[in-house]
Image (cartoon, helix red, strand yellow):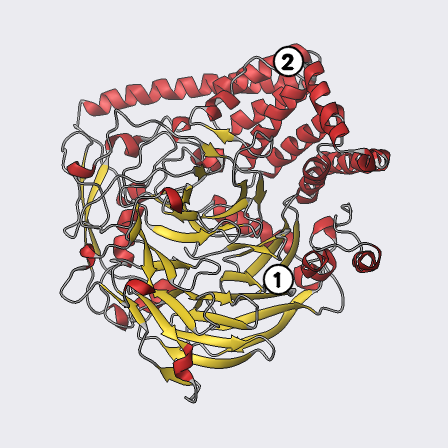
């Protein structure tokens, strides 16, 4: 099956159009044209670091590239010759995670943030006349964070301020005009008055829950089009948008404060009520035009959201109860009203679209038929789903309701058959849209029933199956599904009764259950759909209801002598008690992160649940479970393509609008973490566990893509690669211990040098 061509057309026609009509965005459209994307290949490896390269960034005009590494060095490279200009010994005592050029300083000022909780500023003009490798005194040194600094942000046109996001739960604003060191001599870091966001009581377990735990910040970004907008993400599922103009003045962190109100929360609906401590963001970023945000999750996919909810179908603002409403059977709109609404949308597109509507509809019909063929044969499911995405996401406003209904049902069925992580939730969304288009057709109800069965919700599944049977009483598949669900319900009821009898007999012998440590620490996602469901879907959640863990950690001093230096050796002492047995809470002596003290608790009674903006596109194929600095980025000035690193040593490129995977490139021996596009050229810099930086340009002799089944030599077995990545996500053994505990392991005071392998290796 061959998918339609890319929407940006022929590059030669685009070039010719410049002579006919002037377009200010022609260069922007050319930068990452599909014809260039298909020719991306490795041009050069930049050698100069001695450890994992955790950060790469271009300067504003693209003439320089800066990189930071586990070797605690900052390297500056020129773009024209791809040569190393300077290598700076920063003085950091732990891995560098982020580095930036400070704007409007003639690229003389650069900043770095590292695992030693420090932010350092360097003036490159002091390197004039020195050797390639130099150790210079930092122009400014900020030591006010108490945990690792994971991301720096700068504002276009502002040479005076750098923002830093740290795992201590604070985002700080460093103004060079106010001083070049922090904390001042004789003061403690708690007295530094540069905390712009205090989120030490800001993490949420679910959308309905009040913020309580420390939000370990992993990423932040400032909009280039509206610099007052600030985006942050960390150790929960929610990205937060703040308006800096509405934030209170910078303060100290001597006392925890209530998290400031954000403008918007961003989170896919199906991730908003997991209650899982390990689900967290690794990267957040604005689109080039500032109208969208891109989120990358650990153990999950990458997701695109609109910045603001404007009532469009592609951008939905939802509340905590909306998922429950999604799987219920509410009153549905009249089909005639839906048809009228759709007709208005088509007319509003104007005559240029109407003149070509017949050709578009014919192509869409052919594409949907090809997808249905994939479904029937059970092969090429990825391409079948991509075909449906092409019709719905590119031409959804131009096609009739009948074709849209068929396409939604076909995509839902393909997703349910593929069973990649969270495919079932996307299928539910499609079924909901389809049943609103045509309430009298059985297909949407049939596929919704299958979706709920995969989510281990047989009662709700039976309701939809019975409704489908009432609409199609002679359909054998529907009848068979009804009988199967009834059998499952009967078997589940019998098993529940047996367990209750068994539990009653055992309780007479001993007061409590004996559970193995592995049972408590891990669970294996045997059935991905059921394990990944929201908390209200996992009724038999014994450990969540009955067991809590207190912990102490002790690390011996000889880890550096281990043969396998990437493995953390130590003792974990656990004490178990049932909830309610003790009102005791873990607190940190320094008052940094962890559970809030009583004085800083949020008032649960007065807390009002908030809403969040749902996804409008999902990008699937890569694997993000091994590191917590993995990026997902927009490519080009128009941001029409999305790229992300992966744990399999490759990096992936998708078409933004349709989510279609178009390119997979091998970029590292182990893991690709960083993907950064040149400001103006079709050039991409990537880095990861290797000590080199890869530069990619459109120089391949033969163009190649993934979509449509056409694969170049480097992506010949791309389907096998993607399947393996999805299996890693689905079978990922999720650590039940809270992220706070894991962070305490990672932040332990290691001897110099022993931290590097642990941070560099896949976690």
565 w.r.t. 211: above or below: below
Residue that badge 1 annotates: 665
Q: How many residues crowd mark 1 within 10 Å: few (<14), some (14–19), many (20+)?
A: some
| Place of residue 32 in the rendered image (x, y in percent of width and height, measured from the top left) | 67, 58
Which quarter shows the C terminus? bottom left
Q: Are marks 2 and 1 in contact (CB under 8 Å)?
A: no
Q: Is residue 72 visible?
A: no
Is residue 308 shown above or below 485? below
Task: Please tell me which residue is depicted at 28% across the width and 48% down the height of the picture.
Answer: 740
Q: Residue 294 location in percent, x, y?
A: 52, 47
Q: Earlier in the sequence, mark 2 or mark 1?
A: 2
Residue 336 against residue 163 in the figure, above or below: above
- Residue at x 74% of width, y 51% of height: 8
Along the line of sight, which residue is nearer the eye, 363 or 761?
363
Which quarter of the rendering shows the N terminus? Answer: top right
Would you name the residue on which mark 2 appears? 469
| Residue 471 in which image quadrant | top right
Residue in view at x 14 percent, y 51 percent? 589
**What percent of the width, then of the height, locates residue 365?**
80, 33
Q: Nearer the viewer, residue 123 or 509?
A: 123
State how far apart marks 2 and 1 are (Cα): 47 Å
Q: Around disc 2, counting alpha carbons within 10 Å, would you say few (fewer than 14), some (14 to 19), or many (20 or more)?
A: many
Between circles 2 and 1, the one closer to the viewer is 1
């Amino acid at each position: 099956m061959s998918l339609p061509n890319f929407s940006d057309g022929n590059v030669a026609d685009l070039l010719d159009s410049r002579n006919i009509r002037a377009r200010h965005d022609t260069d922007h459209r050319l930068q990452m044209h599909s014809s260039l994307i298909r020719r991306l290949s490795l041009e050069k490896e930049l050698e100069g670091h001695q450890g994992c390269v955790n950060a790469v960034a271009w300067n504003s005009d693209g003439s320089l590239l800066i990189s930071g590494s586990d070797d605690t060095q900052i390297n500056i490279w020129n773009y024209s010759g791809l040569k190393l200009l300077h290598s700076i010994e920063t003085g950091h005592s732990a891995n560098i995670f982020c580095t930036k050029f400070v704007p409007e300083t003639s690229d003389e000022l650069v900043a770095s943030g590292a695992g030693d909780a420090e932010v350092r500023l360097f003036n490159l003009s002091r390197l004039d006349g020195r050797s390639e490798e130099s150790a210079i005194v930092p122009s400014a040194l900020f030591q006010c964070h108490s945990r690792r600094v994971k991301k720096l942000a700068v504002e276009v046109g502002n040479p005076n301020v750098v923002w830093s996001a740290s795992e201590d739960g604070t985002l700080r604003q460093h103004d060079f005009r106010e001083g070049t060191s922090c904390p001042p001599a004789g003061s403690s870091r708690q007295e530094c008055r540069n905390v712009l966001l205090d989120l030490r009581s800001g993490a949420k377990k679910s959308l309905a829950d009040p913020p309580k735990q420390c939000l370990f910040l992993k990423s932040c970004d400032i909009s280039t089009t509206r610099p007052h907008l600030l985006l942050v993400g960390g150790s929960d599922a929610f990205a937060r948008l703040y308006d800096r103009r509405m934030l209170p003045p910078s303060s100290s962190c001597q006392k925890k404060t209530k998290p400031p109100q954000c403008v918007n929360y961003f989170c896919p609906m199906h991730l908003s009520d997991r209650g899982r401590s390990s689900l967290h963001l690794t990267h957040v970023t604005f689109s080039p035009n500032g109208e969208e945000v891109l989120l990358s999750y650990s153990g999950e996919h990458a997701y695109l959201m609109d910045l603001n909810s404007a009532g469009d179908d592609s951008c939905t603002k939802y509340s905590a109860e909306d998922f429950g409403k999604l799987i219920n059977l509410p009153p549905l709109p009249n089909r005639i009203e839906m048809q009228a609404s759709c007709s208005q949308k088509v007319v509003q597109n104007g005559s240029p679209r109407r003149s070509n509507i017949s050709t578009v509809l014919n192509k869409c019909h052919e594409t949907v038929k090809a997808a249905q063929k994939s479904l029937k044969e059970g092969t090429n499911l990825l391409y079948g789903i991509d075909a449906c995405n092409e019709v719905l996401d590119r031409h959804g406003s131009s096609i009739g309701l009948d074709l849209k209904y068929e396409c939604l049902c076909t995509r839902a069925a393909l997703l349910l058959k593929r069973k990649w992580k969270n495919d079932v939730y996307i299928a539910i969304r499609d079924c909901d849209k389809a049943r609103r288009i045509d309430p009298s057709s059985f297909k949407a109800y049939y596929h919704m029933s299958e979706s709920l069965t995969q989510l281990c919700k047989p009662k709700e599944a039976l309701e939809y199956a019975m409704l489908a049977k009432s609409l199609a009483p002679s359909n054998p598949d529907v009848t068979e599904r009804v009988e199967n669900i009834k059998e499952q319900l009967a078997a589940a009821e019998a098993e529940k009764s047996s367990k209750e009898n068994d539990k009653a007999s055992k309780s007479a012998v001993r007061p409590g259950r004996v559970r193995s440590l592995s049972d408590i620490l891990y669970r294996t996602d045997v059935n991905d759909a059921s394990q990944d469901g929201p908390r209200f879907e996992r009724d038999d959640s014994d450990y969540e209801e009955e067991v809590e863990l207190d912990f102490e950690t002790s690390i011996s001093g000889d880890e550096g002598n281990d043969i396998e230096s990437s493995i953390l050796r130590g003792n974990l002492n656990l004490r178990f008690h049932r909830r309610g047995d003790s009102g005791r809470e873990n607190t940190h002596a320094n008052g940094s992160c962890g559970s809030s003290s009583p004085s800083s608790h949020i008032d649960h009674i007065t807390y009002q649940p908030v809403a969040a903006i749902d996804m409008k596109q999902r990008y699937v194929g890569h694997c993000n479970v091994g590191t917590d600095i993995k990026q997902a980025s927009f490519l080009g000035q128009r941001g029409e393509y999305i790229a992300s690193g992966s744990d399999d040593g490759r990096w992936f490129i998708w078409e933004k609008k349709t989510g279609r995977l178009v390119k997979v490139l091998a970029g590292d021996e182990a893991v690709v973490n960083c993907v950064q596009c040149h400001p103006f050229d079709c050039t991409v810099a990537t880095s990861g566990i290797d000590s080199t930086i890869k530069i990619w340009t459109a120089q391949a002799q033969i163009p190649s893509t993934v979509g449509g089944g056409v694969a170049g030599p480097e992506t010949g077995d791309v389907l096998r690669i993607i399947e393996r990545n999805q299996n890693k996500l689905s079978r990922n053994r999720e650590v039940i211990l809270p992220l706070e505990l894991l962070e305490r392991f990672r932040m332990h005071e290691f001897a110099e040098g022993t931290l590097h392998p642990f941070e560099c290796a896949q976690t």
